Amino acid sequence: MILDINKIRADFPILKEKVYNKNLVYFDNGATTQKPKQVIDTISEYYSKYNANIHRGVHFLSNFTTEANENSRKTIQNFINAKSEKEIIFTKGTTDSINLVAFSFGEAFINEGDEIIISEMEHHSNIVPWQMLCERKNAKLKILKFNELGELKIEELNELITNKTKLISVSQVSNALGTVNPIKKIIEIAHKNNVKVLVDGAQAIQHLKLDVQELDCDFYAFSSHKAYGPTGVGILYGKEEVLNKMHPYQGGGEMISSVSFEKTIYNELPFKFEAGTPNYIDNIAFAKALEYISEIGLENIEKYENQLLEYCTKKLKTIENIKIIGEAKEKSGVISFIIKNIHHNDIAILLDQMGIAVRSGTHCAEPVMQHFGISGTVRISFAFYNTLEEIDYFITSLNKAILMLQ
Ligand code: PLP
């Protein structure tokens, strides 16, 4: 065993909870992960001992918490190997990070007739902000399609790019299919054509080791709550030179260096993009979550979660009338499936009665469902605290559910 699972599970209080008097099996980690006590205790400790608004006061508590918030920024910078802490912007989550770029990059660089490329497998958060931008600017949204395995047709990317293309926005890991996309290749192709790239890392940051300098992406967006941290916090990484050319997304306190009715001067990076009181205690707790992940080691996490994925996929394939949606060679964390003639919600409801939390529906990726001509899937998504025994129990329970529903 690569990981000390018992020790890890003991860190997550919720995993001891019962659901309908059954042991909880939590397979909905793609939606949000559970939190270790190190994160929960940090939140409690800061509210109990150190709470004061940051960047404003001269008093002890304010200075203490300001320093902790800025140290968290450094932890996040190191975690993704960004060149500078100025490139780490605290947001509310992946959605907020993408909207920030769609607005600010859009204002600075997108003109009538320009083109933005996204993929067919994006989460709605990586579709709708670009549609809104295209509507505002009279620009065009183009779609990179995927094949029947759920792999992007990367060979079509060169043809999609024209001299009007300004940005490609693509997920590293699909939340509906589990596909790991070849983002390094996409970035290489894009940069050869002078096109910037935003990577939606919402389903990747918690599973795969990231080095933004090596990857050379222009933007990278992710959420704390999907990576064992609190809700309400996300990160936008952006290259300093690009961020410097973008206007602030929102106006307010913190994002200015001086204000008069005649002229306001914006603050420097990263504060220029952080209007208002930040969610500082959750920012600090998010850094704790990343420290927790680092202690286990992302290489170990990846290896272990791949074992879970392979084991579960093999077992699922023994079930009659099952179709796995998304069978890319490179996958991470997620298995989506349907059972012929049984509604995905009915399966999820029966599994819930047996203590198993799975997701059913479109997973905020309706174009993926449209591609396969289905109304939704059952989705299981893993974290490093899941076990092979839980998978065995899940398979037995799924078989029972199918028998009841046939
Ligand atoms: N992108 C992907 C691939 C996701 O899976 C999700 C959430 O499920 C998001 C973006 C949006 O993340 P959030 O709701 O944390 O902003």
Image (tube, rainbow, N blue to C red):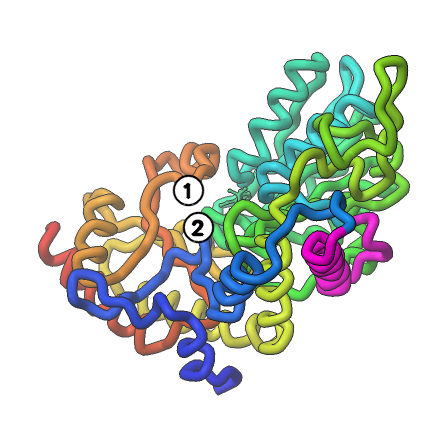
Magenta range is 59-87
Residue at position x 78%, y 44% in the image = 238
Viewer-proximal residue among 93 and 242: 93
For residue 363, the mark is 1
Viewer-proximal residue among 395 and 89: 89
Residue 121 in percent (x, y) is at: 53, 40
Residue 294, compared with residue 122, is above or below; it is below
Does the numbered disc 1 mark a residue whose Cβ is under 8 Å from ligand 1? Answer: yes
Label 2: which secondary element: loop
Residue 104 falls within the magenta-colored stretch: no
Mark 2 lies on residue: 31
Estimate how packed mark 1 is, as few (under 14), some (14 to 19) or many (20 or more) residues with alpha carbons within 10 Å.
many
Q: Name the amino acid type tagged 1.
A: His
Tag in front: 2 or 1: 2
| Residue 80 appearing in the image | no
Residue 314 in percent (x, y) is at: 37, 69
Q: Is residue 255 left or right of residue 375?
A: right
Magenta stretch, main secondary structure class? helix
Viewer-proximal residue among 301 and 154: 301
Does the numbered disc 2 mark a residue whose Cβ is under 8 Å from ligand 1? Answer: yes
Residue at position x 11%, y 58% in the image = 403
Residue 101 in percent (x, y) is at: 71, 33
Residue 375, compared with residue 180, is above or below; it is above
| Residue 267 appearing in the image | yes
